[in-house]
Image (cartoon, coloured by chain):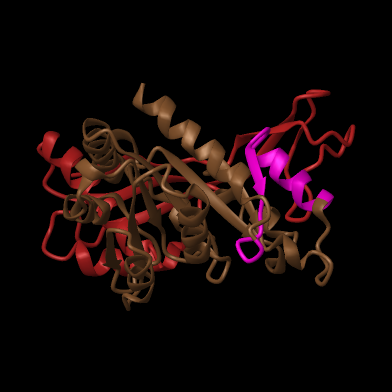
Chain colours: A brown, B red
Amino acid sequence: MTSRIPVVEKILSANDRMADRNRLLLDQSGVYSINIMASPGAGKTSLILKTLESLDGRLKLGVVEGDLATSIDAEKAAAAGLPAVQINTGGECHLDAAMLADALPTLPLEDIDLVLVENVGNLVCPANFQIGTHLNVLIASIPEGDDKPYKYPGMYRGMQVLIINKIDLLPYVPFNMEYFQRGVEVLNPGVVTFAVSSKTGEGMNAWTDWLVKQVESQKQ
Amino acid sequence: MHELAVTESILEICLRHAEEANAAKITDINLIIGQFSSIVDDSVQFYWDMIADGTIAHGAVLHFNRIPGEMTCRTCGHVFQPTDRTFECPSCGSIAVRITKGEEFRVDSIDVE
């Protein structure tokens, strides 16, 4: 005798609950956090280092680096004087809430205003897994091409801030900004957007000024 | 590949609901997956056959009920299916559209004995 049981439960509900716990820990510690997502090579680590430079001591940072293997990125962050922890996902294509739950307590949260979490380089999976940060930031870099919102709508839906990086390359590569932004506007109307070059520093101050305000408004 | 993590979540949800219903065996799992939710059906079934081994969900068949993407124009109200190259409203050309279907990602029901 077969019977049907209604379930109606989001598939990643267990991850979402863990993400809520991470958020609670961060809030109780008075720490703001952002989840930085992008394809490999979009400039996540470079942007973190340039953000540190542009902040110029206005915020105390901590860094969580997610990668399949290696601790290259965490070493770069540590070399810049940041408390950094590396998560090696062992082949998983994204960070999930449980991984961040293991990493957060290893940072000196009481001495940190802002935790920057660098997700695994991937434009597909990270958007599906909430990790408990306050903000999802997507970095789109000019050489990737202007069709990425159309090809990876999930990522463009799942972010709250868009950083267009490597704008110094606009004169050298084909990139139709209007076509790109039309795709973004459909998926994420009115999303907060910054155009920067982490090589030349152009646009970085607008990004970090905004970030400082976000962190301050969170603390109030 | 995130199908293993997804499959583990599906198994946890199904076992919990089957246990609450005092079921002896799970035969079928009915999933609702929107077009914009990325998942590879064959990979999930592959992982399922491994991780459900030894549970009451062993041998259960996963049914992926796919929901096509749907957008609704906020300017003229036209409802349409987006293509992979443009999201503009085919009726009035507006880009003020919203996704109204295609983001579903849930276990809808299970069949048990």
Q: Nearer the viewer, residue B23 or A9?
A: A9
Task: Residue lying at the far front in this picture: please name it.
Answer: A56
Residue nearer the viewer, A165 or B68:
A165
Visible in this render: residue B35? Answer: no
A41 relative position to B21: left or right: right
The quadrant in which the C terminus of chain B is found is top left
Q: Residue A19 placed where, x, y %?
A: 29, 42
Q: Quadrant of the N terminus of chain B?
A: bottom left
Q: Which residues are magenta?
A: A178-200
Most extreme residue toward the right, as rendered? B92
Residue under the point 84% across and 33% down: B94
Identify which residue is drawn at 42% across, 49% down: A35
Magenta residue check for A183: yes
Q: Is residue B52 left or right of residue A119?
A: left
In the image, residue A8 sits, relative to residue A198, either above or below, namely above
Residue at x 9%, y 37% (from the top left corner): B22
Please indicate whether residue A87 sits to the left or right of residue A213 in the image. Answer: left
Where is residue A91, by image quadrant? Answer: bottom left
Report the residue at 58% width, 66% height from top: A42
The answer to which quarter of the image holds residue A145 is: bottom right
Q: Is residue A153 above or below residue A110?
A: below
x and y percentages locating residue A152 in the rendered image: 61, 56
- Relative image position of residue A65 (x, y in whole percent): 35, 63
Q: Is residue B15 a member of the stretch shown in magenta?
A: no
Residue sitting nearer the eye, B45 or A149: A149
Residue sticking out furthest to the top: A220
For the residue pair B26 and B99, the one nearer the viewer reads as B99
